[in-house]
Image: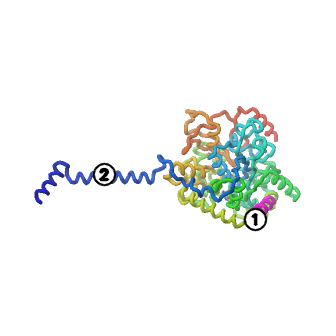
Amino acid sequence: MMTRNRMLRWLVCGRLGPVWMWKALLFFVAIAFATQLLGIIFNKSSTQPAAHSIFSSPDAQGPSLGSCQPHTHIMFLKTHKTASSTVLNMLYRFGEERNLRFALPLGYQLGYPLPFNAHRVKGYRGPRATEFHIMGNHMRFNRPEVEKVMPADTFYFSIIRDPVALAESSFAYYKEVAPAFRKAKGLGDFADDPNKYYDPRLRNNHYARNLLWFDFGMDNNANFSVELAQHGEAMIRQTFRLILVSEYFDQSMILLRHALCWPLDAVVSFSLNARQQKPSSNSIMGGSWVGKAAVAAGVGARAGRSQGKMLPNLSLTDHQREKLRQWNALDWYLYKAFNRTFWEDIDKFGRAQMEQEVALLRMRREILGRVCLRDGGKPVEAYRIRDKNIRPFQSGVVKILGYELQPGLDNATRTACLRMIRPEIQYKDLLDSKQFPRPVQPQLGQQGQGLLAAGGAFGRHDSSRTGEKMMMGEAEMERERDWDGSRIMKSNQTLKGVREKERLR
Ligand SMILES: Nc1ncnc2c1ncn2[C@@H]1O[C@H](COP(=O)(O)OS(=O)(=O)O)[C@@H](OP(=O)(O)O)[C@H]1O
């Protein structure tokens, strides 16, 4: 026994080293193994493609649609403050995933608020010369010009919202842009006596009256009459196969999915462009993200001016709500008319079937929200979003919220999640760069900055990108200012001619 112990000690201490050395070695091996394991669990994203992304599960398809073929020629009239950015995001995603061609604006809007002209589309080369699949950026509708761009079998659809809710959203967003709103202390004051603040001749005042009617291409200052309203309604029905209702967004998505023959995931979305309802501790006065961003970007104009301004007062009495309905009588008429037929369509679809599909849609949104979004999917203020490529554009003093991605996603899931939360401006830039690839210009490099305008307000954004490889879009092309503050190419002679005519209006 003694001899064996002595032999062991000799073996361990003499030939193989001391016991403490073995213990230390084992300890380091264990640590290295655990680190590897944790790395695999938490950091699969950078190296491994997802074998089974949640987006490729059978649930992504939703209930069967029969033997229909998905529509790929689509025109969406993106009305203002109606959840239209959320809808546009779906169109962007659907088209990007299938390499469809978008009729994109030269800047960020298709000539808005001037009536749409085909030459506003980047790459337009005469009636139907190019096959465009999807058109959906802000425009003032003008059917003959749209028909020059889009194929004859295009599916036209749009979205509306209760004019009172729309007025709240518009007042908050365009307070500094529309002169009629700028002068009013709050929305209630404006509602009490709109004529005191409203001058129809002033630019941007269309945001303050019958904005839906205006976006559909009609005269928002026309005196209300049932005959005129019916005529407008009939014009819309002639062109648009479906009018969604923002208040019933999920039911709208089910009708849309069936009309377009699209998979369920194509109409699952996270609400974009939402306004912060309650001010946070540091949001009453300037110092907001928009102020800082504007200062950093050297933009002293509209975005910068919002610094130091109070949040707009949006509270309304029942009487003021009613007055807003009267003030926006043409929109109120449209809302009631299309809301009625919306529910008739749901009756035809089947109420029980609708309930089932809406429940599936909501379940799917919740699952994707848990997978994709940080903080349980709660929208957050822009300044808290570290990645500037998913920070939403800010307008006025209200804060437009966005999302952060869940960390540690695999590549496929991350790409799909990113598409769902990428704000409109950045998404348009990305699609633009894919459709019109240009060599990277080293002098602008990744930090190239582009002046932008969206929703009628000015600001700056950084055109550097993460997540997907970006090529320079039109940023470095010779450009001139568009009506809405965005920039258009000088080289487009036809467009120049069009613009000269437009200036005379
Ligand atoms: N899914 C869904 N359902 C209902 N409402 C939604 C949805 N997504 C966005 N929103 C609300 O739509 C408002 C923004 O509208 P838009 O994106 O059309 O604005 S914009 O004209 O493009 O600036 C904005 O309204 P307010 O928050 O009242 O300003 C968003 O909160």
**Residue in front for this viewpoint, 82 or 478:** 82
Is residue 419 something that shows in the picture?
A: yes
Looking at this rendering, what residue extends furthest in the right direction? Answer: 227
Q: Which residues are magenta?
A: 333-347
Viewport quadrant of the C terminus: top right
Decide whether residue 341 is among the magenta residues.
yes
Binning the other alpha carbons within 10 Å of mark 2 as few (below 14), some (14 to 19) or many (20 upward) gives few
Q: Residue at x 55, y 36 (%)?
A: 445
Under mark 2, the amino acid is: Phe
Looking at the picture, does residue 180 appear above or below residue 461?
below
Query: Which percent across, then down, holds residue 245?
Result: 73, 59
**Is 29 placed left or right of 225 in the picture?**
left
Its colouring scheme is: rainbow
Query: Which percent across, then down, holds residue 468?
Result: 56, 43
**Residue in front for this viewpoint, 14 or 288:** 14
Looking at this rendering, what residue extends furthest in the left direction? Answer: 2
Location of residue 366 by image quarter = bottom right
For the residue labelled by badge 2, is the local secondary structure a helix, a strand or a loop?
Answer: helix
Q: Residue at x 67, y 33 (%)?
A: 478
Decide whether residue 279 is among the magenta residues.
no
**Is 187 placed left or right of 200 in the picture?**
left
Q: Main secondary structure of the magenta part?
A: helix
Is residue 290 something that shows in the picture?
A: no
Looking at the picture, does residue 359 appear above or below residue 459?
below
Residue topped by disc 1 = 347
Disc 1 from disc 2: Cα separation: 68 Å
